[in-house]
Amino acid sequence: MEINAPVPKLLLQLISSAFQRCRLAEDLCRLSVLLDQSTERDPPITCISIADTGIGCNLEEFQNLRCPREFNGAKIWDGLLSVKTTCFTDDEVYYYHINLDEYIANKRLKRQPSQAKNGAKFSGTEVSLSVFGSMDVLVAPIIGFFQKIIVLQIPNVTLDLMVKQGASPGNQTQYVFAVNADKTPCFTASNLERLKSGLEDYVLRHGNCLETMCDYCFSAREHLKVGSGTVCQEDKHKRVGGTMEVVIVISDLLETTQHCSRSCDGKTEVLYFDNFSPSPVPHLALSALKKIDWKKYGLILANVNDQDRHVFLEWENFPSYVQIQIALHWYHNQYPTRQKNGPGISLLKKGIKNALDNLKAKHEGFLLSSHSRKICSYVPDLARSIAGLIFSSTDLDFQGDCLSVLGFQTQEVERDTVEDYIQRKIVTVIGMNERKPQKDQEAAPFLFFDGESETSFFEDEEVEGEYYSSSLE
């Protein structure tokens, strides 16, 4: 089987449903996936169990599941799901067999004898099936799914995967994925705050492939620049509204630092979540990413690489030691809901733009357009000249007045300190002007010539710059 084969896709659907049942529960929950392969048969058969301690399942979620029994001419499974489930208030554990090959609804589901709980109070669901094929093809997409789902930082769910190949204990491997509640106020934080924290961890741990932050590439969490944006869609008539949340993390690894083999290659991975579950990037989101005016933020989009709906953005003239990570999360205001409507292009664009603007507002001189970078290239000389005028004056009252205007209380301040302050203030003003709507931006008056020429002074030369102002380095 291939990774995009029917069985891995079916497994991820079942795991996603189990995760939602845990998320909606008020208590701490566990989601466990067991892959138990018998090596005595040829081809080997793998028994799969997906168990959770969530709220108990709604059998309607199995109505639209489909999975063929054969793939590329080979039998991959028998088409049967075994389900046992109970809610906290139930007196019994209910058992069902669901035949996914059956299209007639009343024949698809067969109820089996139930089991009394004898007064015990618990809830949960277990879904079981048996498949043929390579264990590696089953394990890889599940691990990738778990590595992405913990980006959401849902605090009450712990995930684990147990892989058994044969009866020997030495052939067993367990993977555990849990939110680190020590670093994030998970239970009190908003969905957006959790997404920000989760994406930071995802970057620091190279796609959550590591258990802790990569010490080779990062010395501290403060090396990350984070921006976020939120756009809400109101409920209209019978259409359930939703919320679009966008988080962008930029990690500026030092060019001189020795990076590990997992460090970035200049590409931007786009993570997409649909109602608290990892999802392939939809076509509307692809269109929105292509229509963003990236040049306004000093970025030139070279290509959108769509690998079976796993999307990577490629940039022109982009430093190899800088990594940009984008996470998009769309969820309905009411859940669960039968509606499948997603965000439109305008909503997606607005969310991404809000996150980019938030980054620019939080970090002065950052993500400036090419035009502003040209202006910033003259700022060091201008700041040096202004500081020179102040400190070269023999009029102490004049010096004191100038330093006071700049916010300094003493004349004993160093010239370099004043020069640096002037430089940062000018760059801040340039950034503030860029964030204004285009119609609100006014052209500065011509101070030293009559303005007859329509050619901008800054068009005479090109200034090579990166995605932020070199004046701040």
Image (spheres, grey):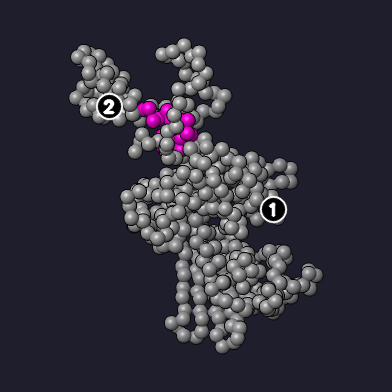
- Reply above or below: 420 against 49: above
Classify residue 99 as left or right of residue 186. right
Q: Of 382 and 161, which appears nearest the observer?
A: 382
Residue appearing at x 39%, y 47% in the figure: 252
> Does label 2 or label 1 sit earlier along the sequence?
1
Residue appearing at x 34%, y 24% in the figure: 382
- Reply above or below: 164 against 462: below
Q: Looking at the picture, which amino acid does disc 2 mark?
A: Val
Q: Of 45 and 60, which appears nearest the observer?
A: 45
Q: Could you say where residue 323 lies in the image, as x and y percent from the top left? A: 44, 49
Q: Are marks 2 and 1 in contact (CB under 8 Å)?
A: no
Q: Which mark is residue 22?
A: none
Q: Is residue 64 magenta?
A: no
| Residue placed under numbered mark 1 in the picture | 340
The kind of secondary structure element at disc 1 is loop
Q: Which mark is residue 418?
A: 2
Residue appearing at x 45%, y 32% in the figure: 462
